[in-house]
Structures are given as structure tokens and as C-alpha cells.
Image: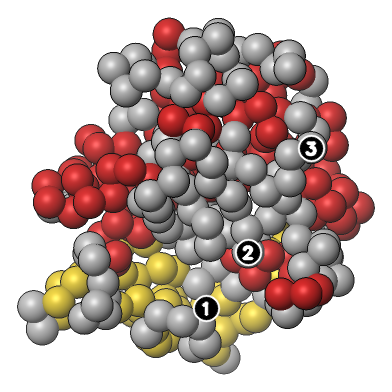
Amino acid sequence: MGGARPKAVIEDHDALWIAKFNRPDDRWNTTRVEHAMLRLARECGISVAESRVETVGGKDVLLIKRFDREKAEAGYLRARMISGLTLLRADEAAELRNRWSYVLLVEELRRVSAEPKKDARELFRRMCFNAMISNIDDHPRNHAVIAKDEHWKLSPAYDLTPAPVVAQDRRDLAMESGDLGRYANAKNLLSQHARFLLEKPDAEAILRDMTLKVGKWYDVVRAAGVSGRDAETIRGAFLYPGFFSRWTDASPRPASMEPSTFTVSTDT
């Protein structure tokens, strides 16, 4: 398997799984944290890949079930699947990333999906989730569409990783998410709600609900076996103060305030 992190494909329980391993230079147990993010995303109403953590030779290994393969008598059936990079007709070169955009991606998704409204709303949730956990590795290859029959749909979510970066006022996603470019900010996420086939009140309601659920990240990661020390290390990734800037009358959000105390306002 390609990618920056060590991984392998294994067969277990009549299915193929991607095994992902920790690296010696990791600042936290990335396998358990990624497993926890998949759980947290599911709590937020996002369709995610099936995962579990196994301990092998005293080391944690994250197993993610391949959703593009299905066991058959003669072996494995392979589903058609293309990445968001292909769907966008984009490129990975730094100077050719002008099409790295959730807004453009949802337009392409609506064009090919058998259920455009459902998939557009799902992509909106994923965009918001990535902003809320500071997943700045949300490049187009980490999105995909899949067809197990003649119909295309958004694949389950995968590669969801928090990044506790230092900046508190502004963090950027890998892809443009609204009128303010790549700014991982609630106002920006809401700015193009219509392209995701969402009325403004619906988009605001989704964002409020997800904010409350992501606000409980600590309980989720600890339940997934993440140590208290690792949980503290990644704390800064979640709902950073700049996320709320210009969304509410409190800018940035005081650390003592819970998301439930906020009223959405997208006025300038």
C-alpha cells in the first residue's frame, strides 16, 4: 500500500483489511487516535469505514476494512472506485491545486451520484468534521466515490486525523471550503451551504449539532483506549478558538464556554 505511513493489506474473517502501524517518531498513539476519530465521526452522523484495533507483538495495529472489496467464491470482487482528485480532474503538484475545493467537489459529486442530495449533505458533514478536529490532511485523495453496481455514491470516510497545530486564530484545511478559501471556520463552512443542497437553517442546525458532539471528543477517545497523556497532547486540535470567529457574538470562544451556549449568526 502507498502513502506516507506504514501499512499492509491482510485477510481476516473472510475480508480484506488495511493494517496501519505506529511509527517510532509519532507524538501519540496514532492507531488508537485514528480509530477514535472514526468513532467520533460516526457519532456525528458520518458514514465511516469499519475499524478495530488489535495488539500484535505488544504493538497496536489499526485495522480498517476495505469497502472496495467483497468476498466471493472465486476470490474478491473489486468495486469501481475513484478518488476525489480524479473526480475533480485535479493534480497533486503544489502549483496545480486550484481545483482542490469542497465546493467544486460537491458539484462533481452531485453530477455522478445516484443520490445527490444525500451525498452532498454527507460531504458537508465531513468538511465540517475535518474543520472541527483540525484534520489538515483532508486532501482530495482522502475522499472517494465508489460503485459496487452501476450506481456511484460517496465512499465511507477514512483517514481522519487530528492535528493540534499551534495557531489559535486561523487554521486552513487542504481544500477550499467556502467564500474565505481554506479557512477552517464555521462562517466559512456555512457560506456555500446551497451548493451542498442545504437551506441555511438546516446547515446551521447540522453545524450546531456536530459542534456539540465533537465537544465530547475526550470521552470518545478515552473509550477507544487512547491514554490520558495522548488525549491531552491532541486536545488543541478540537474546536480551536478561531473556528467560532465571526460565527457568534463571542469571538473567539472563551475556553470556559460550551458550544451549546452559542447562537449562529453568519452576518458579517
Is residue 40 visible in this depiction of the protein?
Answer: no
> In this view of the protein, which residue sits in the foreground, 54 or 133?
133
Question: Is 106 positioned to the left or the right of 223 in the image?
Answer: right
Numbered disc 3: secondary structure: loop
Report the mark closest to the observer, 3 or 1.
3
Q: Rounded to the nearest whole Å, what is the CA distance between mark 3 and mark 1?
A: 44 Å
Q: Measured along the vertical axis of the image, is residue 249 above or below residue 246?
A: above
Q: Quadrant of residue 143?
A: bottom right
Q: Are marks 2 and 1 in contact (CB under 8 Å)?
A: no
Q: Rounded to the nearest whole Å, what is the CA distance between mark 3 and mark 2?
A: 18 Å
Residue denoted by label 2 = 139
Q: Measured along the vertical axis of the image, is residue 153 above or below residue 31?
A: above
Answer few, some or many: residues within 10 Å of disc 1's Cα (few below 14, many 20 plus, some between 14 and 19): few
Numbered disc 2: secondary structure: loop
At horizontal 57% and vertical 91% (from top left) the residue drawn is: 74
Q: Position of residue 151 (x, y in %)?
A: 81, 60
Looking at the picture, which amino acid does disc 1 mark?
Answer: Lys
Looking at the picture, which amino acid does disc 2 mark?
Answer: His
Question: Is 223 positioned to the left or the right of 149 in the image?
Answer: left
Looking at the picture, which amino acid does disc 3 mark?
Answer: Asp
Residue denoted by label 1 = 71
Q: Earlier in the sequence, mark 3 or mark 1?
A: 1
Residue denoted by label 3 = 179
